[in-house]
Amino acid sequence: MSHDQVREAGQPGLGLPRHGARVGTKALADAGIDYTEVQQAYVGYVYGDSTAGQRAVYELGVTGIPIVNVNNNCSTGSTALFLAAQAIRSGVADCTLALGFEKMKMGSLGSTFDDRAMPLDRHISALSESYEVAPPMAAWMFGAAGREHMKLYGTAAETFARIGEKNHRHSVNNPYAQFQDLYTLEDILAAKMVYEPLTRLQCSPTSDGSAAAIIASERYVDEHGLGAQAVEIVGQAMTTDFASTFDDTRNPMTLVGADMSRHAARQAYEQAELGPEDVQVIELHDCFSVNELLTYEALGLCPEGEGGKLVEANDTTYGGRWVVKPLGWPDLQGPPARGDGTGPVRRADVAAKGYGGRRQVPGASAALQHNIGLGGAAVVTIYRPANR
């Protein structure tokens, strides 16, 4: 498996052809293969017309292969990756392409259609029983989950802000990060309040970007001598909402995907025969700082309610037990570029192969990628170097 990503924020003239050509060409070159070797392609995007995936991939070649367009809210790109890997595991293909891209409008996320039920109507209705609806919608949902964590476990607003500070600090060394400015904890706390406890510097902005991955079977990798540049998917699981999402407790943390993430992580660990203690690098869904803390607990890094202790102990940065989001925030994952969730694959690759430069996590032997999309879907993937 090989991959690459680009950031195109602030360049509105760049469209689907550039998305497909730039990241697809780089991923193929990294893999050392020609596009004619690709047997199927899965292309994720949220904002785009039908068959936009074909238009993006056609820049690489027009070979008649199946191209599947994927839309799964903020886990779209990771869902494309899941499907591309599933095709390999099932034996129907030996070499597939997963590509994700997004071109977004400025401003907060909103509903595109007003003549049909919203996909999140059940989630919004359940959450509104405990927390009055307040725009912007996504910040309200995750902010409410943060408030619930504060109420139940005594978590301080500053704890969420420290996550934002850590991720912005990591982004300084990442050329793909949308912003590479260094902010102090005081800067994070003093930024405009969007929905308490979330300030502006704890919320992902809109952005454009793309990422691509080449997925191949073990047989294909061996026959083509690609083991040196390959990273193996040793565990991968995708889940959707469970009955617990809408049960009588109306728990805001569950409504924003905590249970989906928890179940997906357990399945992925079981497949990989690894646990959270065996992973050194974690790339998780970075929409809001609140969600990072909730995901610590969902991934089993600590018991429920104790995510704040990891933050206070600096256990999720360099020198700690894990390095979470070593390439910083906001990067190319879920929001801001919602369809391009193959970006974390690239970061897992960087960690596993050891060419991350200043971003490299010393001694990394396994990496975990996580994405969620409300409405809902969660994908967790665990990687190790193929030649280990």
Image (cartoon, rainbow, N blue to C red):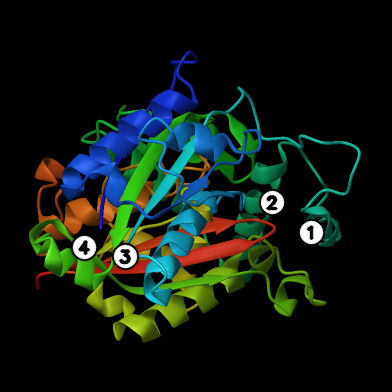
Whether pointer 1 and pointer 4 mark residues with C-beta atoms closer than 8 Å, the reply is: no
In the rendered structure, which disc, 3 or 4, sits on the residue that comes first in sequence?
Answer: 3
Measured as percent of width and height from the top left, residue 307 is found at: 44, 67
Q: CA distance from mark 3 to mark 1?
A: 44 Å
Question: Circle 1 is placed at which residue position?
Answer: 127
Residue 180 percent across, percent down from the top left = 30, 28
Instruction: Residue at the far top: name it.
Output: 13
For residue 94, which numbered disc appears in the image? 3
- Residue at horizontal 83 percent and vertical 60 percent from the top: 122
Percent position of residue 143, x then y: 64, 50
Circle 4: element type: strand
Which residue type does callout 1 highlight? Leu
Q: Earlier in the sequence, mark 4 or mark 2?
A: 2
> Which circle, 3 or 1, is nearer the viewer?
3
* Residue drawn at the location 43% of the way across and 75% of the way down: 90
Determine whether the residue tagged by mark 2 lies in a helix, strand or loop: helix
